[in-house]
Amino acid sequence: MGTGRCDQEATVPEPSSTAANGAPRSLAEALRARDDAALAALLHARPDLLSPVPGDVTQLATRAATRASVVRALDRLDRFALQTAEALAVAPDPCPYGVLESLLAGTGEDAPDNGTRAALPRALATLRDQALVWGGDERLRLVRTARELLAPSASRPSPTGLGPTVAEATAGMSPTRIQEIVAAAGLPATHDPVSAVAALTGLFTDPARMSALLDEAPPEARQVLDRLVWGPPYGEVTANPAPPVRWLRDRGLLLPATTRTVVLPREVALHLRGGLAHRSPEPVAPEVAVQREHRPPLVDANAAGQALAALATVEELVKSWEHAGPPVLRAGGLSVRDLKRTAAALDADEPTAAFWIELAYAAGLLAADGEVDERYGPTPAFDDWRELPPAERWSVLAEAWLPATRTAGAVGEQDPKGRTLAALGPGLDRSAAPEVRRRVLELLAALPEGASPDPQALLDRLSWERPVRGTSELRARLADRALTEAELLGVTGRGALSAPGRALLEHRDPAQPLAPLLPEPVDRVLLQADLTAVAPGPLARPLADVLAVLADVESKGGATVYRFTPGSVRRALDGGHTASDLHAFLAEHSATPVPQPLSYLIDDVARRHGRLRVGAASSYVRCDDDSLLGEILADKRSAPLGLRRLAPTVLAAQADPGALLDGLRAMGYAPAAESHTGDVLVARADARRTPARAKPVPVPEGPPLPDETLLAAAVRAIRAGDLAATAVRKEPEATAGGAAASGELPRTSAAETLATVQAAALTGSVVWIGYVNAEGAASQRVIAPVRVEGGFVTGYDHTADEVRTFALHRITGVAELADDQV
């Protein structure tokens, strides 16, 4: 069962040399026979063939057979299509359809059929559509590059587990040794090694004779064969092998690969396997099993809760960076320490915190400020985002997540140079991530509404769709992360696709199905005597902003709990609020009477707030109560501040005003900063914003998918270039130097060129020209001249399918087309 030599796929034979039966003899011929729709489908499935647009079908076939393009095409095959290609790689070349079917479904009437025969036409059509296989059903040919990639070799075992053929394994073996094997196998001697190998191959491919030979084998020899039959087919032997191995080697059932290695010939393995190239063909995609079913309203309600939590988390994250965002590492990205600090602030683990950071970055809410001491901070888009209704804010996040190629799951991994990947840093793009996310959502959408899948079954399905090792492992990691991120974001609820997630998948506005599921913002809180406030739902924007300053968040969830402390009240006073402002605010927004302990707390802090004044001299403390200043001086904790009395009501300090304020507050006082005029300074820090930044652009996986307009134009260009390349020209007349070679463009003088194109313009005929453009690129074109004047010829260019003007001095030669080509 030899592999044979593939024809040159890109060869373009002259029309007169076409095979009598009309069967294509090369990949180029097979592509040329396709209609425009089939060519467009090929270019859509393999967009790398369009960069740049091939000049004709020959260039298209050549590019489709290059190693890089074939590897990319194989990576995108499903498991059974790939198994079909692998079977063709170990089949004879060319391979009849029946032989391929027996390799995948087995031989004999008792061969089990698990749907392989029914699925084989679809798999073969996929390989044909992607130009990996060409030829009719009786002469199927795998593209030579694909055969080289998939065929077994000593350095690269075949996925089928098969080894070399008898002819390949005996290449280089001495004729005497081959004759010894033939004799031991019970075959008559031959006159040459070629016929001896053919006789041995015939024995191994004859089921009856092969069974009779194996019946004579010792039981131990059969055990050796059983260990090698499904691969790997190689085994190590000693210089003096055991009798069972010697019996197999003597009869050619094991052939030497090296001095210490033997190999099981492909023909023997196929006989032992019952003709199967694969142990377990997988013609049908595995079903995604349902793990649990929920009521759709419950799924949507759960997803809405997750969506609200996502909005609150992203807003909290970005606001925490608006005053003093973390610095940007020299290599780019966020330091591990800052990631841990952010995770603690968000009450999340580090991978989850990295996801929220990357999501805010993908939505354009976070960016680096671009300063010399570069830091991260909110962008102006964050302010616009906060003003949107909650459903629309969630839509911005979800629509940024689905096509993003940056993957937070890669944070902490090592890059090829051994460096740890950081959040917001380089190296996090995974071009397959958008396609995997969308495919995961599509599989969820195919389940009954409200059903959540078995995660392992979903991963098995994705592995079947892209089984190539490396590609499959990456997709499994991306899919697992996509399930987690979808649940965090609210695209799914309890593992099932939600109504907003379905709208996102179907390119509809996800805000519309989400809006009715979200509670209306409330403008009331429940104040309690233990100095806490309970927010029974999402707070209206003004209330949320003031309460975030006046109180600290104690717990999050369906109802957020805030706690009032002396420090939080002082923070509000530092921000410019007065005690009366705070009392009025709480009375207005409390659904219950303001508790006395809270009123006392505000009044007590306000009474002490500002009694001490700190200014810059290096700094000083001023107080109308000289006894209070004496108390501070007597306190040992004030020693690091370097205080000394300048006057009964003034203390000077060596510390700067900020450190002095912090030191006095640590001692239990409530000082206020003052200006040079003695006015109290409002200590509210201005929210910092980075300059306007564009969102990160996703990194596509290979060339972008072409649209219909580009596909139609590319097909027209390929057809036109093919016409120019394959058109038959009139044979030039013999000259003194001899006739020009057939098919070559003659070199014509300027006068001959001018006369020929003028005659073609008068008669309306079509000519073939060689042309060199201003950049020096030479090309061949088929044109119909309509006007010749001023050193230029204007005509319809069949190659470009449009009217163009050519400079006569750039035409290197011209020839008329044969009469049957006009």
Image: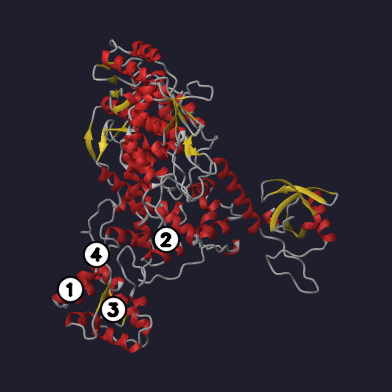
Residue sitting at 51 percent across and 32 percent down? 617
Task: Give amino acid for label 3.
Answer: Thr
Q: Which residue is mark 4?
A: 274
> For this view, does 84 lie left or right of residue 749?
left
Residue sitting at 47 percent across and 48 percent down? 332
Q: Earlier in the sequence, mark 4 or mark 3?
A: 3
Q: How is the image coloured?
A: secondary structure
Q: Which residue is mark 3?
A: 261
Disc 2 element: loop
Task: Give amino acid for label 2.
Answer: Leu
- Mark 3 to mark 2: distance in Å? 34 Å
On-image quarter of the N terminus: bottom left
Q: Earlier in the sequence, mark 3 or mark 1?
A: 1
**Circle on res. 222:** 1
Residue 572, horizontal then vertical, whole percent: 39, 22
Q: Which residue is mark 2?
A: 140
Residue 470, horizontal then vertical, whole percent: 36, 56
Quarter location, residue 133: bottom left
Disc 1 element: helix
Mark 3 surroundings: few (<14), some (14-19) or many (≥20) residues within 10 A: some
